[in-house]
Amino acid sequence: MAQSGGILTGQAVEDILKELKRNSTILQMHLQGTNFKKLTVIIGLAKKGEKRFFTVDSPPGFEQAASSRGRWSIYLTFTDADGVPYSFSSAGGNRSILKKRNAIRLEYPARIERKQRRKHLRVKPPVGSVTTAIIDGKPYDIQIINISLGGALVMFSSPDVQKRVVSRGKEIRDIMIDMFPGREDRSPVKINRAVVRRVITEQVSNKEHYGLMFIDMSQEDTARLKEYIYANQRQVLRKAVMPDA
């Protein structure tokens, strides 16, 4: 799939739906106006007259959630192999629920939105990296999933961190990251302030991931974080070119 942002229509919509079906790509579906959110896959594409439809697997509980709504709308999202997020909406009604096939027949979306690629390069943290942060005056251990100059995707190691402690818009202070474990002259990179921009439930483990945006760093710490990110990327590229090196 292409990697730039924009609105896709016409044949591009057809091509993406075909690719989603061929690859059995996981989609997150949200029945609009309800709390019903489940995972599904596209299992069929069809045409009836001038109308086109795609069929998705019906998640447990969908029929009950949709039964009292008459006409309803579903919002679907997925991420391609390059990490670019896509989203689109479709509509249906009670006749769209195919009970014998345990499926839902939906109208082709008029458009699919493709988000812009990230502004900053993201990399994994070093093995052995230790990270701590302060939330409401209390220290917490953090597990970094990936990091960039603009932010990071993290998990909280402590089991007592609940959504009431960390939610969207929450400010986190004094994030200390050991980016250079093993170096004698190492000292942690410090992010003075960050804010939670996204809360994501990971599909496999059902654990909460938090997208942080860095809003206050010193020039020295920014330079040291940049040093690690670009050194990491050079190593990745070197391995790609010389896999046996």
Image (tube, rainbow, N blue to C red):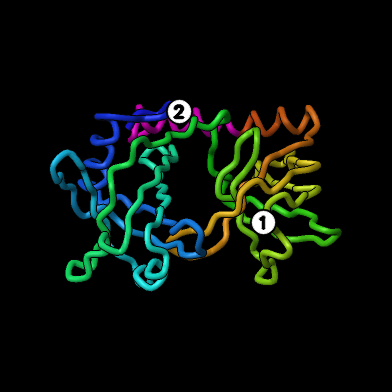
Between disc 2 and disc 1, the foreground one is: 2
Please tell me the numbered disc located at residue 5.
Answer: 2
Q: How many marks?
A: 2
| Disc on the earlier residue, 2 or 1 | 2
Query: Quick one: SS at disc 1?
Result: strand
Q: Quadrant of the C terminus?
A: top left
- Residue sitting at x 69%, y 66%: 161
Asked if residue 243 is among those painted magenta in the image, a careful observer would answer: yes
- Residue 65 rendering spot, x and y as whole percentages: 42, 69
Residue 13: quadrant of the picture: top left
Q: Quadrant of the N terminus?
A: top left
The foreground one among 218 and 45 is 45
Label 2, residues with CA under 10 Å away: few <14, some 14-19, many ≥20: some
Query: Quick one: SS at disc 2?
Result: loop
- Residue sitting at x 69%, y 57%: 167
Amino acid type, mark 2: Gly
- Residue 150 rendering spot, x and y as whole percentages: 65, 34
> Which residue lies under the disc numbered 1?
142
- Magenta span of residues: 229-245
